[in-house]
Amino acid sequence: MPLTEFTKKLIETKLNDYCERKIPIAVRNQIKLTYKIVGYKVTLIEMRPYHLDPAIWTETPIAQFRFDRDTQKWSLFSIDRNDKWHLYDLIKPSADLNDMLKALDNDKTGIFWG
């Protein structure tokens, strides 16, 4: 069973705003930030033009937010070089997705933004 339509709209509103604020207008022809919602997982994705053909945009997953139906809380995950997701345990699960976005921005490890 996927997220409710209300929850999905709330996520879309928050992430549209986040992606809009994160990338300056002046560089949006070089980098974009978007997301995909699949089931209870929301993946934040960085997009850049492919160097051999700038008309093609490549996608790189940055972070994943997972919603636990039992606890009604979000958790933040990072991806490794082998495309495996790992719990980012420097923040506790939260009912508020904004807490995960703040943790993403405040990450001192460089695991998300390098």
Image (cartoon, rainbow, N blue to C red):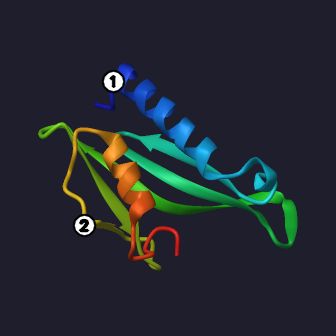
Residue 106, percent from left and from top? 40, 62
The mark found on residue 82 in the picture is none
Name the side, left or right, on which 107 lies relative to 86.
right
Q: Is residue 7 above or below residue 82?
A: above
Quarter of the figure that contains the N terminus: top left
User: Which residue is farthest top?
Assistant: 6
Q: Residues within 10 Å of mark 1 (few under 14, many from 20)?
A: few
Q: Please name the residue that numbered disc 2 is placed on.
A: 90
Residue 44, percent from left and from top? 50, 52
Mark closer to the observer (2, 1): 2
Residue 59, percent from left and from top? 63, 60
Seen from the viewer's position, the closer of residues 26 and 79 is 26
Callout 2: SS: loop
The residue depicted at 41 percent of the width and 27 percent of the height is 10
The residue depicted at 32 percent of the width and 47 percent of the height is 99
Name the side, left or right, on which 112 lies relative to 47.
left
Residue 96, percent from left and from top? 28, 39
Q: Is residue 9 above or below residue 66?
A: above
Q: Residues within 10 Å of mark 2 (few under 14, many from 20)?
A: few
Q: Please name the residue that numbered disc 1 is placed on.
A: 4
Task: Report the Cα–Cα distance between label 2 and label 1.
Answer: 28 Å
Q: Is residue 101 above or below residue 69?
A: below
The residue depicted at 40 percent of the width and 55 percent of the height is 64
